[in-house]
Amino acid sequence: MKKILFFLLLGFVLIPTEKILADDDDKPFYKGIRVGWQQSNFSNSDWGDLSSFYAGFFGVKKIGLGKLLSFYSGLEFYQIGSQEDNDNKFVISYISVPINLRVKVGPV
């Protein structure tokens, strides 16, 4: 329980970080921290869902004319799984490297 409470508090402290950094349109490169909640969903199974947090770092490099394009990449750690009861759990841990090309549409 203490672990869940710690990550919830950490998430509320770090959530504004991405928004603050993303609002700065003058910077050609910015970086930040991502923290969130991951919900797993196992269908056709007697096992229940096992939800957890994810955490990682990201970087965004603006490219192109008028900074309409941006390249987004990062490093994230997350876990998914399921549980039958308190003693039986199935957990898979991942480290992912997301690579995205973003296109800005509109003034937002």
Image (cartoon, rainbow, N blue to C red):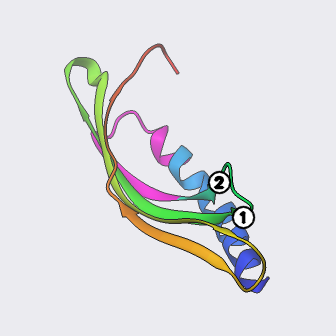
Element marked by disc 2: loop
Observer-nearest of 64 and 75? 75
First along the sequence among labels 1 and 2: 2
Residue 99 in the image: state x and y as whole percent.
29, 44
Q: Residue at x 44, y 39 (%)?
A: 24
Disc 1 marks which amino acid? Trp
Judge by depth and name the residue closer to the eye, 37 or 84.
84
Q: Helix or strand or loop: what does disc 1 sit on?
A: loop
Boundaries of the magenta span:
20-34
Which x, y percent locates residue 5? 76, 76
Q: Within 10 angstroms of label 1, few (less than 14), some, or many (20 or more) residues? A: some
70 in relation to 78, above or below? above
Task: Find disc 2 in the rendering and name its residue.
Answer: 42
Read off the residue under disc 1. 47
Percent of width and height locating residue 61: 26, 41
| Disc number for residue 63 | none
